[in-house]
Amino acid sequence: MDEFDDDRLRALLPSLRRFARSLTGDTANADDLVQSALERALSHWQSRRDDTALQSWLLSIVYRQFVDDYRRTARWQRVLGFFGLQAAESAPPPDRVHEGRAQLAAFAELPAEHRALLVLIGVEGFGYREAAELLGVPVGTVMSRLSRAREKLRLLGEGIAPAAPPLRVLVNRSPP
């Protein structure tokens, strides 16, 4: 499949939007993220390796585009702070304001890495190995992050703020 398949790409749009929404937490930003990722994908269409893994390839591009955008925004915030300027705050969209379900609110509190894994594995049906390849991390990292994400989501859903893990004090017991 060397040529562009519009129908297949359109069928994947809801999945891409869900994933982008889980990362950004905002419908408008998610749409912008998907558009940027699709522009990148279309400009590099010939470089994809596996025609059967189009969804994985596109989700990987969405994730990397999100990370790039986040880093770029953080750099600009530091530059603005250096010059004593603040970025203009925008009001949240009405659909975000009226989100009433506690589980979605808890989901939004999770770090982006946890949200991405929960969506990829829990919603999109990817396996641990596929998610690891998509995110560029080891399988063990996927498994441990997913376990922590599920536990934290469970605690937040129950209204319990997860405690920070206790620090261990290491004592040197070797003779002087």
Image (spheres, helix red, strand yellow):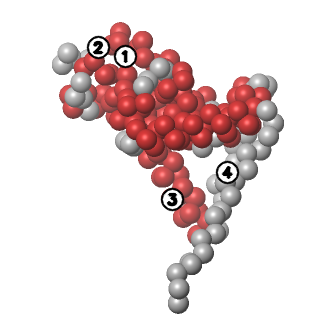
Q: Residue at x 24, y 29 (%)?
A: 48
Image disc number at residue 75: 3
Q: Quadrant of residue 64?
A: top left
In the picture, measured across the screen, residue 165 lies left or right of residue 56, that is right
For marks 4 and 1, give the CA distance.
35 Å
Image disc number at residue 88: 4
Mark 3: give few (<14), some (14-19) or many (20+) Cα within 10 Å. few
Image disc number at residue 9: 1
Q: Residue at x 21, y 32 (%)?
A: 47
Identify the residue position indicated by label 2 in the image. Answer: 5
Image disc number at residue 167: none
Mark 2: give few (<14), some (14-19) or many (20+) Cα within 10 Å. few
Mark 4 vs 2, N-terminal side: 2
Give residue 167's position: percent from left, percent from top: 65, 62
Q: Contact, CB < 8 Å: mark 2 with mark 1?
A: yes
- Residue type, label 4: Ala
Give residue 13's position: percent from left, percent from top: 46, 18
- Residue type, label 1: Leu
Q: Is residue 58 visible?
A: no
Q: Nearer the viewer, mark 4 or mark 2?
A: 2
Q: Nearer the viewer, mark 4 or mark 3?
A: 3
- Residue type, label 3: Arg
Mark 3 vs 2, N-terminal side: 2
Q: Nearer the viewer, residue 175 or 89?
A: 175
For marks 3 and 2, give the CA distance.
37 Å
Identify the secondary structure beneath mark 1.
helix
Give residue 153's position: percent from left, percent from top: 68, 35
In the picture, measured across the screen, residue 103 lies left or right of residue 22, that is right
